[in-house]
Image (cartoon, helix red, strand yellow):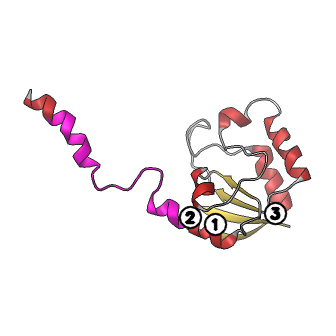
């Protein structure tokens, strides 16, 4: 009984003073950077960054809004559908986090090939954040 009680009560104490998982100080720092870089009415896309940053930075995503999931972009024609919308109404800024090495389906490893190429063709890299995130501004 003592072992069971220890196992149940141990976990809350381990996490007691940890930051919230989806609202860390790093998330708030990144949101502040986005707020300073991107005007309130300017369109933005986050490539490889968590979508909660749109809310924390009080900015709206470009339309159509889509997240950077391999299972989504690997469906036939999905990248092209997004790019067709962007050709009509380009986001002014893109914050692009470098993909990490690993299986294409692991979190943080996927990078849509057509979208990435299109960004490089239509945007200029205007800055970096912590050597992991680059800021791209519409040409």
Q: Quadrant of the N terminus?
A: top left
Q: Name the residue under label 2.
A: 30
- First along the sequence among labels 1 and 3: 1
Mark 2: few/some/many CA within 10 Å (<14, 14-19, 20+) = some
SS under mark 1: helix
**Mark 3 touches mark 2? (CB < 8 Å):** no
Please state the horizontal and vertical placement of residue 102, each as a whole percent of the image.
Answer: 56, 41
Q: In this view, does 98 lie to the left or right of 125?
A: left
SS under mark 3: strand
Q: Mark 3 points at which residue?
A: 123
Q: In the image, which residues are magenta?
A: 6-30
Please state the horizontal and vertical placement of residue 57, each as a whole percent of the image.
Answer: 61, 62
Picture layout, residue 102 above or below residue 86: above
**Mark 1 touches mark 2? (CB < 8 Å):** yes
Marker disc for residue 34: 1
Dominant secondary structure of the magenta stretch? helix
Label 1 to label 3: alpha-carbon separation: 17 Å
Measuring 70% from the left and 34% from the top, which residue is drawn there?
72
Task: Give the label, 1 or 3, closer to the camera.
Answer: 1
Measuring 19% from the left and 39% from the top, which residue is drawn there?
9
Please state the horizontal and vertical placement of residue 64, each as a whole percent of the image.
Answer: 78, 45
Label 3 to label 2: alpha-carbon separation: 21 Å
Picture layout, residue 99 above or below residue 32: above
SS under mark 2: helix
Closer-to-camera residue (2/55): 55
Measuring 73% from the left and 33% from the top, which residue is drawn there?
74
Instruction: Answer with the quarter of the image where residue 60 lies.
Output: bottom right
Please state the horizontal and vertical placement of residue 115, each as a whole percent of the image.
Answer: 78, 48
């Amino acid at each position: 009984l003592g072992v069971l009680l220890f196992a149940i009560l141990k976990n809350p104490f381990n996490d007691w003073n940890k930051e919230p998982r989806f609202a860390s100080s790093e998330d708030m720092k990144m949101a502040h950077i986005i707020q300073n870089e991107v005007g309130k009415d300017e369109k933005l896309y986050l490539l490889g960054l968590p979508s909660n940053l749109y809310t924390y930075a009080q900015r709206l995503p470009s339309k159509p809004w889509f997240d950077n999931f391999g299972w989504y972009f690997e469906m036939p024609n999905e990248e092209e559908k997004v790019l067709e919308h962007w050709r009509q109404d380009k986001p002014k800024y893109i914050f692009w986090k470098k993909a990490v090495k690993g299986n294409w389906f692991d979190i943080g490893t996927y990078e849509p090939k057509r979208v990435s190429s299109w960004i490089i063709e239509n945007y200029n890299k205007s800055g970096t954040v912590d050597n992991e995130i680059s800021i791209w501004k519409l040409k």
